[in-house]
Image (tube, rainbow, N blue to C red):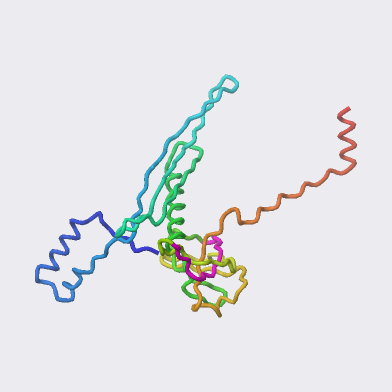
Amino acid sequence: KFAMLDRSFEQERQSEMGLLSSGDASMEEMAKLGNRLGTDYMIVGVIEDAGTKTHTTELAGRTLSSSTTRLSISYRVIDAPTGQIKMADSWSGSMPGGSIDGLTTKAADTISRQIVDAIAPIKVESVLGNELFLGQGGKSIKVGQKYRLLLAGEAIVDSYTKESLGRQEVEVGVIEVTEVQSKIAKAKVLKSSVNIAEKFPISTFIVRLQSEAAKPAAAAPAKKSPPAAALKKKSENDW
């Protein structure tokens, strides 16, 4: 979970700060002048490839055309004070059609989820019976999504740099989002191998979106065999 800082309206902000420092404001208001936040992380990226390729096919004297749009992005998450790269990855995708809008939306959703998962995974903030309250809401979470419920263990530290690499994670269940608000989301526990209410809040629980590959595939409908009489009639008609 991140606090976003605005750098687009510096002139308007400086104008307001000038009013506070003019001497007309109270001491309490003037004390706010030293509370400006600095950036912890910066996200930078490069569009490696983007475009649309059109395919043409000749069929029965007619020319048929179709197009495929592609997009490839590489990005980094940089620790602003030190310049250290905290995360680096890339995303590539393609889709039929001539518009790149759908691909950019998909790329933004995927990349933002990857960054959150790596730096600040969603935590369980409260437990009420079989209902969990997650510390993230808004458009990034959708009703019906299933998440893996993970018990966070000891921290893992790099032996050379002493940098924290994350924490041990043990999957203990699956949850499903039932309600999404602006800052939190509610979810019900579908299955769990531990008593969540007993372990919370001493233990830390986090959730990660269940991948499509982890979902069980829908069983194909069984085909009914035609009756023997129908097969016999078909055989006679063939002759």
Let me know if residue 32 is in the magenta part.
no
Q: Is residue 68 left or right of residue 14?
A: right
User: Can you say whether 87 is above or below 3 in the image?
Assistant: above
Q: Which residues are magenta?
A: 143-159
The reply to whether the magenta stretch includes residue 152 is: yes
Q: Count how many numbered circles sit on residues in the image.
A: 0
Q: Nearer the viewer, residue 147 or 118?
A: 118
Where's residue 152, x and y in %? 51, 69
Q: Residue furthest bottom?
A: 198
Q: Residue at x 56, y 59 (%)?
A: 210
- Residue at the far left in the pictured view: 23
Considering the image in quadrants, where does the C terminus appear? top right
Percent across and percent down for residue 30 are 16, 72
Taking the spot 57% from the left edge, 19% from the top edge, the residue there is: 61
Please indicate whether residue 80 sits to the left or right of residue 103 in the image: left
Check the picture and name the quadrant holding the N terminus. bottom left
Above or below — where is 6 with respect to 94?
A: below
Of 83 and 133, which appears nearest the observer?
83
Magenta portion: prevailing SS class: strand
Q: Nearer the viewer, residue 75 or 123?
A: 75
